[in-house]
Amino acid sequence: MIYKIVFSCDEVDDFRRVFEADSEATFLELHQAILQSVGYPDDQRASVFICEDNWEKREEITREEMNT
């Protein structure tokens, strides 16, 4: 299955990115595609949040282990 993911930003006029990802793709692959599409370096911490239907954060997936 292929997922179509659309990103937009209310703070930037006409900002829109469309990604197609295989159901086997990882969050890291999505992260790298997003950075590449906007020309950002890949040297920062990053997280993906799994949310409820009302956008409440349920789970955070970090790029690197955050246990201290």
Image: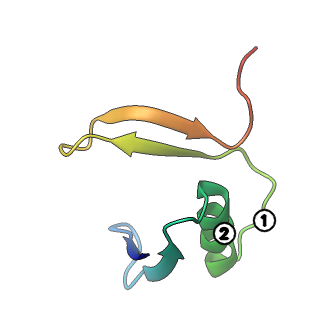
Corner quadrant of residue 36? bottom right
Tell me the number on the disc at residue 41: 1
Give above or below for 12 relative to 66: below
Q: Quadrant of the C terminus?
A: top right
Give above or below for 63 relative to 28: above
Q: Can you give x and y, in whole percent of width and height, for residue 38 in the image?
A: 62, 77
Amino acid at pointer 2:
Leu
Give above or below for 17 relative to 42: below
Q: Nearer the viewer, residue 3 or 63?
A: 3
Q: Residue at point 69% right, 67% down?
A: 32
Disc 1, SS? loop
Corner quadrant of residue 18? bottom left
Q: Quadrant of the N terminus?
A: bottom left
Q: Can you give x and y, in whole percent of width and height, for residue 66 in the image?
A: 71, 26
Q: CA distance from mark 1 to mark 2?
A: 7 Å
Give whichever of discs 1 and 2 has the lower sequence position: 2
Q: Residue at point 70% right, 77% down?
A: 39
Horizontal side of 15 relative to 34 (left or right) equals left
Q: Nearer the viewer, residue 44 or 6?
A: 6
Disc 2, SS? helix
Q: Residue at point 38% right, 69% down?
A: 9
Q: Can you give x and y, in whole percent of width and height, for residue 65 in the image?
A: 74, 30
Tell me the number on the disc at residue 26: none
Q: Are marks 1 and 2 in contact (CB under 8 Å)?
A: yes
Label 1: few (<14), some or many (≥20) within 10 Å? few
Amino acid at pointer 1:
Pro
Tell me the number on the disc at residue 35: 2
